[in-house]
Image: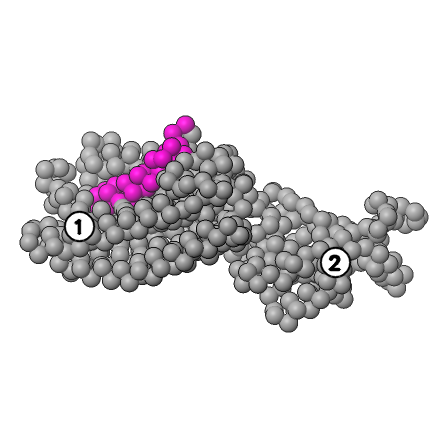
Amino acid sequence: MNKVLNSKIENVLDSADRMFIATSVGGNSSGASVFFSRDGEDLVFFTFNPTRKAEQIRLNPRVHVVIWPKGQEGIEGLQIDGECYKIKDEDEKKKAYELVLNTTEAFKEYMEDEFLINNDVVGYYRVKPTTIKYVNFFEEEQFQWKTIPGNKTSALKMAFKLGLKRIGLWLRTVRAPFLTATFAPIFIGAAVAWSDLKDNGIAESWSWKMFWLVLGGASLAQIATNSSNDFFDHTSNADEINKVASPFNGGSRVIQVGLMTPGQVLITALVSIIGTIGIGLYLNEQVSGNYFGNTPILWTGIIGTFLALGYTGDPVRLGYKGFGEIAIALGFGPIMVMGAHYVLTAPIHNNDIHQWNWVEALIASVPIGILVMLIVWINQFQDAPSDAAVGKNTWVVRTAVDDGWMRMEKPLSLYKQFMVEAFLSVAAIGFLGMFTDFGTVYAFAALLPVLLVWKAFKMADEWMIKWNNPDADRQKVPYELLLVNVSTIGIHFLTGILLSVAYIL
């Protein structure tokens, strides 16, 4: 019986070159038809790693495959349950390359493209069948099964792997690596507060509990901003038509690749902002004795919530009307720095605003506010064509010149100008520390990232030359700006840390 069934399965596989593969994550299903090759009992195929099926396979390797011979319409065929994995071993990749080419050369150009290979845009995948169902309506026994237990991961191990991947999904959804945009201003606000407590001889009144609550509330505010941005850029189609998305632009992509529904992303934003409001009201009660006491905490919370949800949210959509950059600079600059400072210096001012050293907190917030805006600014270069197509009038879109393609000289010039102004403000903090009661002379140490700035400027200029080449491949060149994106994030965070240390010293 097994030999007969194996022969039938072999005949179907030998007479087919395409399969339909179904994937699913969290109720978001997907299906695609792909060419396949055989490697023993395994099925091997080529695809693009950012595709919906590849992203879903990465998170949930369990797949369902349907194969039918050429010329048949589902009367005879195979239904296969299995586990699918991206091939990572270099020798296996070479083998998969040869196997796929034996089936089709339709994708040979992409399979050999060094840019796509080096940037992990393309890859090979292996399906290891666990159950094969042979279907033939011409036969008396229309359904026959073959199981391959050795290919099946144990339920406990699979649950553990899927649990870890689910955690990774949520970290991706909230864009956890970019929470440094929140950490830097909160660290600065906390450092200025510590300095003030120390100068007033009450350093022992420092509260780690209040610090962690401030950091947690601010982080939730950024998560709300990121998630609402993903949702509303989905509803406007800005992220849907973006063909050059990367880890630094185009959103988290969890909606576009079917890892979460738009509703789930919106709920993430709403739950996060509710968490922010809850923490903010608790902090307000701790400082003023009243959850809704008329304090800077309440007002920075109201303004911060408005900016978080209004950045791309209906009906405000600040980012679509040219106010997004200002909102980012204010929200992740003065609002976070001054809000953190007010909470953590409560033992000094006792909720008397006239006793609050707000000028120092404001001065300290200026460079970090400019630098966080520049993270968004440089990330918008890759997004500019899709943003312009849906009417998202960022300042990069507004200042770019349409000359058959979007010329970016003006946006890049403004990027450099704002970067210089950010470090001039750092130097100003140092000079104020030398000649006044404000600032700190140790702020000059925060000028060290200028070396990274010089490198970022040089890489940006080299990128601009490539972008302005009339023959440039505009699907590839945007990826070459990624090092500038990374550098800008590094400049922001490193400067924030150094400024924080300066105030502590």
Q: Which quarter of the image is occupied by the C terminus?
A: bottom left
Q: Main secondary structure of the magenta part?
A: helix
Q: Is residue 22 left or right of residue 235?
A: right
Can you say whether 461 is above or below 309 in the image? below
Residue at point 76%, 53% (across, down): 18
Q: Which residue is mark 2?
A: 104
Q: Residues within 10 Å of mark 2 (few under 14, many from 20)?
A: few
Residue at point 40%, 46% (across, down): 408
Q: Nearer the viewer, residue 227 or 204?
A: 227
Answer whether residue 54 is magenta in the image. Answer: no
Answer whether residue 317 is magenta in the image. Answer: yes
Q: Is residue 16 left or right of residue 203?
A: right
Q: Nearer the viewer, residue 79 or 436?
A: 436
Which residue, as the protein is rendered here, is positioned at the far top? 315
Q: Name the amino acid type tagged 2.
A: Thr
- Secondary element under disc 2, as helix, strand or loop, is loop
Q: Which residue is mark 1?
A: 193
Which residue, as the protein is rendered here, is positioned at the far bottom? 91
Q: Nearer the viewer, residue 269 or 158?
A: 269
Q: Is disc 1 in contact with disc 2, using a CB cutoff of under 8 Å?
A: no
How are the colours assigned in the image?
one colour
- Secondary element under disc 1, as helix, strand or loop, is helix
